[in-house]
Image (cartoon, rainbow, N blue to C red):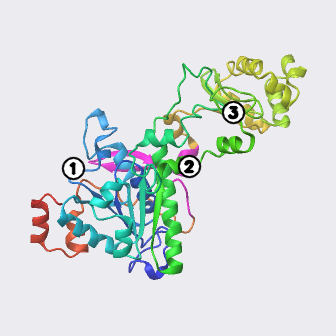
Amino acid sequence: MVPASEQEPGGGRDGPFTGLKVVELGEGTAAPYAAKLLGDFGAEVVKVEPPAGDPARRRGPFPGDRPDHERSGLFLYLNTNKRGLTLDPACVAARAVLDRLLGWADVFVTNVTPEQLRRYDVAPLTLRAAHPRLVVVTITPFGLHGPYAAWRGDELTTYAAGGLAYSTPGMPDAAEDLEREPPLHPACFVAETITGTVAATASALALFGRFQTDDGCHVDVSQQAAVAAIQQRDVTVASYTGARYTRLLDPRVIGRLPNFYLPCKDGYVAIAAPADAHWTRLVEAMGSPRWALDEKFDTGAARIANWQELRFRLIEWTMQNTGDEIYRIAESLRMPLFPFYSLRRMAESEHVRTRGTFVTCERDGVPFRMPGQPIRMSRSPGGLRRVAPRLGEHTWEILHDWLGYEADAIGRLRASGAA
């Protein structure tokens, strides 16, 4: 994506963003994940942390459940292929250093609050005036424009405000009682990860634009909007038909059946047979039981009308088989049926091993695995070049070797708490 003329001298072709220079002033997941994606594909990323460190360092999980800000699994994953610099932008001296660093950079990614953007002198208009070729990417809960612009929010706030909580659980793992089964949130940072992906993609598009115009821009990413953008099903149905999802198993809005998550002999399995051809194969897979040949189930409309009985009939069959047994049957009949994988089973599966979905890293002599890049590029694959930085690990290198600060100036920055 970065033109050869803009690459660093001697830069390799180990990733499509080789030669790209990124500064990240972020915490948690959204901005760090955006910068990580750029770094994993070759960009030189400098992570700016306050002297106390990114709060993700304190979130864990930790080996042996012993808190250690250098061994947080979350931090180690989100900050591969970065160099680490400690600066406190609340200090005037540190803001001057940050400004010099941004003069070096192509992209600035941040998810600090709008108030902090102004206080740190990194508001988009300020940076656009000082560094016209810089691509400024701001990530905030609700964007920098609109009545909610000054509102604060986090993962759970934006997951709910983006509409995703309202429809979770939804078909096929729908709720049966709205009072007893409230909206759910998965055990991961869904909203922030989606937002980080959007921000990284937008950065690439902005760089392409800069290549055409030689001018940077401001990319204003709203975490709520990023979440809302994946709500195609609910928004489309509501806009075109006026129907409302209620998280209940409702045949009026769940589409063709069967389309269920069902228990099986050793866990759960997804049973999807939306078309008549699929239903015919599923009946064959079940051994053509008499109930499945009844007129109550011989058409799509009939299966929707009798969906409750259909669900329990299918459970009678799935409970006689393991998930792998059902999958083998499905493969032979070209059916979209699949057992639920636990995280451990997924990570140890032959497919994941063959594709190299997970990479092995090391910290303090202890090896560990984490997800690698979600996509592959044949000519410029990128990959893991360095593990996440220790707190302030590259401060001297960046200040002295890259930015030209003398040793006594660095000493004064550290003595004042600015670095």
Q: Is residue 300 above or below residue 417?
A: above
Furthest residue toward right: 295
Three-letter amino acid code at disc 2?
Answer: Thr
Please tell me whether mark 2 or mark 3 is closer to you in this view: 3
Instruction: Find residue 150 and name its label.
Output: none
Q: Residue 4 colored magenta?
A: no
Q: What residue type is labelled 1?
A: Ala
Answer with the quarter of the image where residue 271 lies. Answer: top right
Residue 354: where, in percent of width, then height?
56, 49
Q: Quadrant of the C terminus?
A: bottom left
Q: Which numbered disc, 2 or 3, marks the residue that appears first in the sequence?
A: 3
Dot 3 or dot 1, earlier in sequence: 1
Residue 84 visible within the image: no
Question: Where are the magenta residues, as a range?
Answer: 351-377
The Cα–Cα distance between marks 2 and 3, rounded to whole angstroms, is: 20 Å
Q: Which mark is residue 52?
A: 1
Residue 404: % across, % down = 20, 76
Q: Which residue is drawn at 40% across and 76% down?
A: 132
Labels 2 and 1: the sequence-earlier one: 1
Q: In which quarter of the image is residue 239?
A: top right
| Above or below, 66 relative to 287 | below
Residue 188 visible in image: yes
Q: Residue 327 carries which label?
A: 3
Secondary structure found at label 2: helix
Decide: few, some or many residues near mark 2? Use Cα within 10 Å; few <14, some 14-19, many ≥20: few
Q: What residue type is labelled 3?
A: Tyr
Q: Which of 103/77 is in front? A: 103
